[in-house]
Image: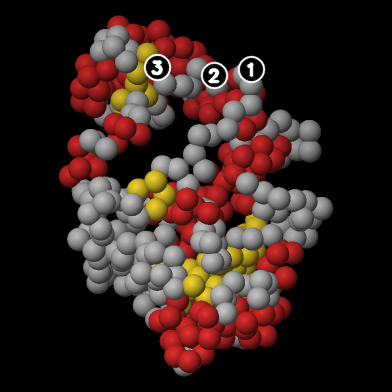
Amino acid sequence: MIRLLTGIRVIEVGAVVLGPYAAQILGDLGAEVIKVEPLEGDIARNAHPQGPDGGALFVNNNRNKRMLAIDLKQAEGRDALARLIGTADVLLHNMRAEAAERLGLGFAAVAAVNPRIVHCASIGFGQAGPYRDRPAFDDIIQAASGMAGLAMHHGGEPQFVPTIVADKVAGLHAVYGILAALVARERGQPGPFSVEVPMFEAMVAFLMNEHLAEASFTVEGATGYPRVLSPNRRPFRTADGWIAVLPYTAEQWRRFLAEIGREALCDAPWFRDARARQAQIDELYEILAESLPARTTDAWITALSARDVPCSRIATPDDLLSDPHLAEVGFFEVPETYPASIARMVPQPVRFDTVASAPDAPPAGLGADSRAVLRDCGHDEARIDALIAAGVVRTGPG
């Protein structure tokens, strides 16, 4: 935990990945994050694979948080949460707008309770458009945003990227939106602040940054960045495996061509002109594909690294567990604060070497902090006991 947001209280009413991922980053940066769960818990707690401390998906998205389990379908639960929101700096949720309104978590209701609040709604589709009420999960957003359709540029079938990319991209947008609002508030801009982060629009922006292409300039222009969409831009076979090689500048291409004895190509008029070289990129990629099977992956890594040509062996997720660079920086190391049942964790990758830090707190059990959180926002013990007895609040091992 990096102590940059000390004193900032974040209420996360999130589930699965998007909201929890964003809130975890804020917790990693030192904010006090209070995760609000239904009495049955975030469904990610039960996601496969399971360890003694819950599902791996939950464990990797919920560190550095306090856990409050409360039934927001009951008026007493909504009232208790409203009291907590009155003490907060940020309210973050990733539910559909209609559900948020029903639970008292819409912007107007939250702002009425706390006029300084930063209200962040991480939703499927922007509320100004006709898709506003559609349900949204990662596959749906990959399909709608054009991500799954990229493979069709190669003549193939649509494919989902095999990671929860839409949730995580939207989660990162939520983090910077929240931080920007907090900075504005600290500089004197009055609140409340409404931050809307639609997954669909976030993914379209992420994708079309390069793929707007010719359509940037004319209504009839084609989309698609040719360098990226070339079917020849791919992992290449070597004599014993796979490698990625990406000469990008003219000088890098010269070094690669010199390595394979094809430096005469550097004298071609099209090679010397940057735009003409871009138009011939498929020919250069074909040269890569034809040349690389002649040597082993290790031999290419050695030779191309010596010439400072960008390259890498193709790693699998399993390979990352023994990657020497990640081992040296202690990437997957588990802090002493974690239970022995957790062998590795995915850390916060951004480093702040001149800022004070503290060990990360592991994900806690369902309702582990319910009593303490309610006490912090002014409930006395008798009231907390009554909420627990009425089935409004759940407590767990702290």
Task: Label 3, secondary structure: give it.
Answer: strand
The label number, if any, that marks residue 236 in the structure image? 3
Task: Residue type at mark 2: give it.
Answer: Pro
Q: Nearer the viewer, residue 17 or 44?
A: 44
Image quadrant holding the N terminus, namely bottom left
The label number, if any, that marks residue 231 in the structure image? 2
What is the quadrant of residue 302 in the picture? top left
Discs 1/2, front: 1
Neighbourhood count class around disc 1 (C-alpha, 10 Å): few under 14, some 14–19, many 20 upward: few
Tell me whether the residue at label 1 lies in contact with that at label 2, contact meaning CB atoms closer than 8 angstroms. Answer: yes
> Residue sitting at 24 percent across and 42 percent down?
326
Compute the Cα span from label 1 to label 3. 19 Å
Q: Nearer the viewer, residue 335 or 364?
A: 364
What is the quadrant of residue 263 in the picture? top left
Neighbourhood count class around disc 2 (C-alpha, 10 Å): few under 14, some 14–19, many 20 upward: some
Compute the Cα span from label 1 to label 2. 9 Å
Tell me whether the residue at label 1 lies in contact with that at label 3, contact meaning CB atoms closer than 8 angstroms. Answer: no
Q: Position of residue 3 (x, y in %)?
A: 31, 72
Q: Position of residue 240 (x, y in %)?
A: 29, 12
Q: Position of residue 82 (x, y in %)?
A: 60, 82
* Residue that numbered label 1 is attached to: 155
Image quadrant holding the C terminus, namely bottom left
Task: Label 1, secondary structure: give it.
Answer: loop
Compute the Cα span from label 2 to label 3. 12 Å
Q: Position of residue 142 (x, y in %)?
A: 62, 39
In this rendering, position of residue 181 left or right of residue 45: right
Task: Label 2, secondary structure: give it.
Answer: loop
In this rendering, position of residue 283 left or right of residue 349: right
